[in-house]
Image (cartoon, rainbow, N blue to C red):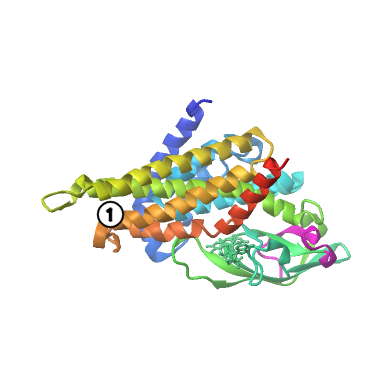
């Protein structure tokens, strides 16, 4: 086993570090306060090839591996978790198109998405259906050569700025999870509209909206994958997305550790640096150890994904561990900063708010535990 990155991975890390330090970090607080989608930064990320790092060059990607994408996510998340999440969401949509799209669909959407000229969204969740994705109610009924979509989706990341959405709808209600199909719906299709935008706790600047479908007619050729394959596509892409969420948590934890160490070295109480106090050191040592453990779990999941084969359990382990750890340690980062940490003059309160989402989306951490247990029981039962 080698604990080293390749030259290409290190080059990607350095390039993204420069972008994050020079472009993203100076704007992070502003994005958090204004809650506006940072379109200019997004376009720059597209020009630098950061949206499609681990996709083939023929579809506009950089042809790098998932570890490179993970390293990029970590660097951007250190500066702004919202921007990192925007970039990794695009890779989530690209993953669906790359693995399940027809050649025509890939050519139409992927190169433009890779350049930041086209934005997608992923429409699975509904008011009555979150963790239990198979219980969605949005329907797609066949009518001649078209499908007619009706229903409501909520929590859709970038729903209000997206040019199209990958929409999951019931095509055969008698088959439950096997009766769900994915479709590509362009934003200008009559009957498709954007509803309420949610006011979130954190990850400001990365909008989340309701999407409404009222008799939206789309041609059969807009089906993504095969009829009845929707849940398979959703779960496969969520496995991959969970590695990126773990990376986001690792990036936030790195930022929390760096800020905590710097603050503890400068702040004095009782006539000495607070970093001399063993109770402060206990928080820092646990933060650093969990950061390493979370990073290693995330790199392992990325490596397994690139090697081919199943990585469901490892992606869930990385997501669960890293996101529990980031919540604990962004809380402790505020503790180390004392009262100052509770105010906006320091970044740790933003890290704390941004961290919470990582425990909820791409499958809550309770769902990750269910997935891990299911895989472990399968693996270890004789
Ligand atoms: C900011 C944000 C962005 C999002 N982006 C998207 C997006 O782009 N596209 C999209 O489709 N969705 C998106 N989501 C939705 C997200 O995936 C769901 O919020 C998530 O899957 C949980 O669903 P829920 O909120 O309905 O909670 P519920 O499923 O209702 O869960 C509520 C609680 O019950 C627990 N629970 C549920 N089932 C079980 C079980 N079997 N055993 C034990 N505990 C259980 C959960 O862990 C949780 O603690 C986003 C959500 C947020 C907040």
- The stretch drawn in magenta includes residue 245: no
- In the displayed structure, would residue 345 be above or below residue 8? below
- The stretch drawn in magenta includes residue 185: yes
**Residue placed farthest to the right in the image?**
144
- In the displayed structure, would residue 124 be above or below residue 244? below
Front position in the image: 325 or 248: 325
Front position in the image: 173 or 371: 371
**Residue sitting at x 66%, y 59%:** 165
Q: Which residues are magenta?
A: 172-191
**Residue placed farthest to the left in the image?**
271
Locate ligand 1 by image quadrant: bottom right
Q: Percent position (x, y) of residue 196? A: 56, 73
Residue 251: tell me if it is visible. Answer: yes
Q: Which residue is mark 1?
A: 336
Q: Is residue 283 left or right of residue 206?
A: left
Q: Percent position (x, y) of residue 80? A: 41, 52
């Amino acid at each position: 086993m080698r604990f080293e990155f390749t030259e290409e991975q290190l080059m990607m890390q350095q390039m993204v570090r420069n972008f994050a330090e020079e472009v993203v970090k100076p704007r992070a607080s502003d994005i958090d306060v204004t809650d506006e989608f940072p379109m200019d930064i997004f376009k720059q990320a597209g020009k630098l090839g950061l949206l499609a790092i681990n996709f083939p060059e023929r579809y506009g990607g950089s042809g790098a591996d998932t570890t490179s994408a993970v390293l990029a996510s970590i660097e951007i998340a250190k500066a702004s978790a919202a921007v990192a999440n925007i970039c990794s969401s695009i890779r989530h949509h690209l993953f669906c198109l790359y693995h399940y799209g027809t050649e025509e669909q890939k050519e139409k959407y992927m190169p433009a998405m890779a350049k930041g000229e086209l934005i997608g969204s992923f429409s699975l969740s509904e008011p009555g259906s979150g963790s239990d994705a198979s219980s969605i109610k949005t329907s797609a009924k066949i009518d001649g050569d078209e499908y007619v979509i009706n229903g409501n989706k909520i929590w859709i990341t970038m729903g209000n700025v997206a040019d199209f959405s990958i929409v999951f709808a019931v095509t055969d209600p008698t088959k439950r999870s096997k009766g769900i199909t994915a479709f590509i719906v362009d934003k200008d299709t009559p009957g498709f509209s954007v509803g309420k935008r949610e006011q979130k706790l954190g990850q400001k600047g990365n909008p989340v909206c309701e999407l409404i479908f009222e008799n939206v007619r789309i041609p059969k050729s807009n089906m993504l994958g095969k009829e009845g394959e929707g849940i398979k596509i959703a779960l496969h892409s969520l496995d991959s997305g969970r590695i990126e969420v773990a990376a986001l948590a690792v990036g936030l934890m790195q930022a929390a550790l760096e800020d905590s160490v710097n603050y503890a070295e400068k702040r004095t109480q009782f006539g000495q640096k607070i970093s001399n106090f063993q109770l402060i050191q206990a928080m820092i040592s646990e933060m650093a150890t969990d950061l390493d453990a979370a990073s290693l779990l995330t790199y392992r999941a990325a490596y397994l994904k690139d090697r081919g084969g199943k990585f469901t359990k490892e992606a869930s382990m990385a997501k669960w561990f890293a996101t529990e750890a980031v919540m604990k340690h962004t809380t402790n980062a505020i503790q180390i900063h004392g009262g100052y940490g509770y105010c906006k003059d320091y970044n740790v309160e933003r890290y704390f708010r941004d961290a919470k989402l990582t425990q909820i989306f791409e499958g809550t951490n309770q769902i990750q535990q269910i997935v891990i247990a299911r895989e472990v029981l399968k693996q270890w039962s004789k």
